[in-house]
Image (cartoon, grey):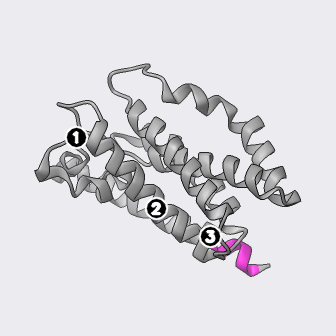
Amino acid sequence: MQSYFRPAKHSLIIMLCCVVLLILNTVFQINRYGIAPREISHVTGIIFAPFLHGDWAHLISNFFPFVIFSCLIGLHSLKRFWLVFVLSVLMTGSLVWLFGRAASIHIGMSGVVYAMWGYLIVYGIKQRHFRDLLISILVLVIYGGLVFGVLPSSPNISYESHLFGALSGAVIGYLLSKTRTT
């Protein structure tokens, strides 16, 4: 039973890092290290952007879905959580860096949240195991409104992160449903 709480602990530590960085941003303006599409000097933003948030509301809006989706992915194993997390960060960030709106800085965990959302839906449908399929259905029912986040709605919201996150997660879910990784 304790193994089910390990992904929650790890996702809370990740979000604690986001809190620390948000506090540091008030002094050091570190959000400038997010993703600036097609700018070589900002390629490191692919890794750092998910941990940077504009304000407390931005962080909180990502906090709960990130922890919930992390726990659901972690039902397989802690290794699976980390695999999906790292692939989500790298794939989503790379796509945003390549195709995102120019003259903007993309920050926040929402791309990873959308990747986890896409992963959970596709993985459960492809696996067809009862638990995974049930999780897919619950994620679709409870978080189905996320689909509207992939559409442009505000110049201050990176719909590109949402769109590329959902697509990345769907690809990750599809590929991992075909392999025997834990």
The answer to whether 149 appears left or right of 99 in the picture is right
Rendered residue at 48%/50% (across/down)? 112
Disc 1 and disc 3: Cα gap in Å? 31 Å
Residue type marked 1:
Pro
For disc 3, the marked residue is: 7
Q: Secondary structure at mark 2?
A: helix
- Dot 1 or dot 2: first in sequence order is 1
Q: Residues within 10 Å of mark 1 (few under 14, many from 20)?
A: many
Q: Residue at 60% of width from left, 33% of height from top? A: 146
Residue behind mark 1: 37
N-terminal of the two: label 2 or label 3?
A: 3
User: Outermost residue, top direction?
Assistant: 153
Amino acid beneath label 2: Leu
- Assess whether residue 90 is covered by the magenta stretch: no
Q: Is residue 63 visible?
A: no
Residue 146 falls left or right of residue 129: left
Dot 1 or dot 3: first in sequence order is: 3
Tell me the CA gap for discs 2 and 3: 16 Å
Residue 17 makes an appearance in the image: yes
Q: Which residues are magenta?
A: 2-7
Report the front residue among 165 and 2.
Answer: 165
Disc 1 to disc 2, how far (Cα)?
19 Å
Secondary structure beneath disc 3? helix
Q: Residue 170 at x, y = what percent?
A: 58, 48
